Amino acid sequence: MSDEMACVVCGTTKRIENHHVASEANDPIFVLPLCAKCHRAQTSQQYARNHPLARDLARTTQLIWWAMVAGVSSLLGEYGKLRNNQDFASLAKVTESLITGIDGTPSPHAVKRLLHSVGIPKPTTKTVLRALAAAGRYLSDWGFGPGHPLADIFRRIENDPGKALQEVPGRADSLSKITKRLLETISQYRDETATEEETYASLMELAEDLSRVLDIGSETG
Amino acid sequence: MTDKIRIVFAALATLTGITLAEFIRIAEGNK
């Protein structure tokens, strides 16, 4: 981090504190700079959503993952609220839906429930796909940088969700392997048996494999 | 952006992709 730290939510450089995104008990090293005011707001949210804060709790990888995602989701929501950007608010909701059920498994039904709760009365398969693709595009641009094949797939699904609904042979098998590898990668990162560089390289590779599974063909073809 | 949050965003992007693919699979099953 640079000497001049700015709050990742509001951007001020005054009264910067360390915010434990997943709470200190869950992840002592995942720290981001926040100003005192944004820090207080984030901590209140952790309490409000019954974030697992107790130090003596038995922590599984899934629980820690939940806490991390919940923390990132709160940050995204606040970032969007301050900028009056509805995309970020929706993104926070969709991100949050990924962890509903606390077991860390993706939950498509939870996505539908959440979209319903934010005012889409009867989310159709296409609206859900479009919302997930939009969230994925943001996350992929921030995580992997623009131009990653996964971001490109997300963009194409966002533009034409109907085209994504085609059967791809062997998709289920590939998906369950990718899910397993993702959980292993997170677990190794948590246990510190993999470095940040190794974890990032694994994620890049996983996302490339995933983009092949999700491929809906080229826009021109 | 710190490496750590880049990793979390990258992992979330992957998880979102998996969720999307799972969703497609379920939708296909309902056809």
Image (tube, rainbow, N blue to C red):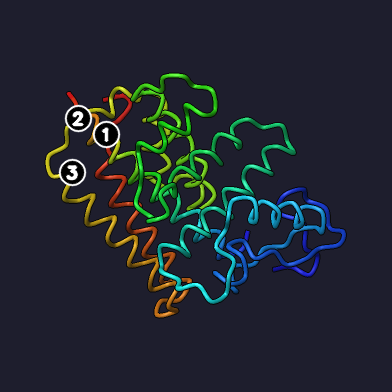
> Which residue does the image show at 77% across and 48% down from the upper left?
A10
Say what secondary structure mark 3 lies in.
helix
How crowded pointer 1 is (Cα within 10 Å; few <14, some 14-19, many 20+) is rated as many
How far is the residue under mark 2 from the one under mark 1?
6 Å
Q: Which residue is mark 2?
A: B28
Q: Which residue is mark 1?
A: B24
Label number found at residue A171:
3
How crowded pointer 3 is (Cα within 10 Å; few <14, some 14-19, many 20+) is rated as some
Q: Amino acid at mark 2?
A: Glu
Vertical placement of residue A18 versus A220, above or below: below
Tell me, yes or no, whether the two marked residues, 2 and 1, touch with CB atoms within 8 Å: yes
Say what secondary structure mark 2 lies in.
helix
> Which residue does the image show at 65% across and 56% down from the upper left?
A47
How far is the residue under mark 1 from the one under mark 3?
10 Å
Q: Chain of mark 2?
A: B
Residue A14's spot in the image, x, y percent?
A: 87, 59
